[in-house]
């Protein structure tokens, strides 16, 4: 029988364990210049959690199997605070075990505790496996067009 899954905020001392998962997530989304030091500098601002957000880790038997990175943000349409789950990643060998769903549920609980009006996230249009999970949570997908302006 597998040990229970534990989901908790990533501590600074756990950053080195988290970095390979961040790099794998970035490679999945075809980031060409994955830089551990830049990732370490950026993501360390979200640990323990911080005023900017939180990183939740999913652990089983001392092994980090996935993470969700949450950003505290706002929506002028509501208007209210929202929580953006900007990253959700589960290592390939642990997919299909309920870890992604558990990370979403704990992320939603964190958002509720903050008094946020929504938990939001997005995924690639061709990431059908993730979309099946997201649809199963009761989340509503919205048709929108995303723009990026490089600065």
Image (spheres, rainbow, N blue to C red):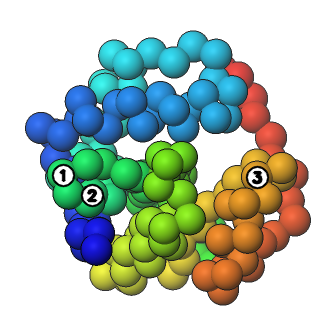
Are the two marked residues, 3 and 1, in contact with CB atoms closer than 8 angstroms? no
Picture quarter with the C terminus:
top right
- Residue in front for this viewpoint, 125 or 111: 125
**Which residue does the image show at 70% across and 53% down from the upper left?**
123
Q: Which residue is mark 3?
A: 127
Q: Earlier in the sequence, mark 2 or mark 3?
A: 2
Are the two marked residues, 2 and 1, in contact with CB atoms closer than 8 angstroms? yes
Q: Which residue is mark 2?
A: 59
Across and down, in percent, residue 88 comes to: 51, 54
Q: Earlier in the sequence, mark 3 or mark 1?
A: 1
Q: Is residue 126 above or below residue 39?
A: below
**Which residue does the image show at 39% across and 30% down from the upper left?**
20
Query: For residue 62, which numbered disc appears in the image?
Result: 1
Disc 1 is placed on an element classified as loop
- Residue in front for this viewpoint, 109 or 133: 133
Task: Identify the residue at the far left of this view.
Answer: 13
């Amino acid at each position: 029988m597998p040990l229970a899954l534990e989901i908790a905020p990533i501590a600074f001392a756990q950053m080195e364990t988290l970095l390979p998962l961040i790099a794998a997530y970035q490679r999945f989304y075809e980031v060409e210049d994955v830089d551990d030091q830049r990732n370490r500098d950026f993501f360390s601002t979200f640990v323990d959690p911080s005023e900017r957000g939180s990183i939740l880790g999913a652990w089983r038997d001392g092994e980090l199997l996935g993470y969700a990175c949450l950003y505290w943000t706002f929506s002028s349409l509501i208007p209210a605070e929202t929580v953006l789950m900007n990253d959700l990643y589960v290592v390939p060998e642990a997919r299909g075990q309920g870890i992604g769903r558990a990370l979403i549920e704990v992320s939603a609980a964190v958002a509720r505790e903050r008094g946020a009006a929504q938990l939001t996230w997005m995924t690639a249009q061709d990431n059908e496996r993730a979309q099946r999970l997201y649809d199963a949570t009761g989340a509503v997908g919205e048709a929108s067009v995303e723009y990026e302006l490089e600065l």
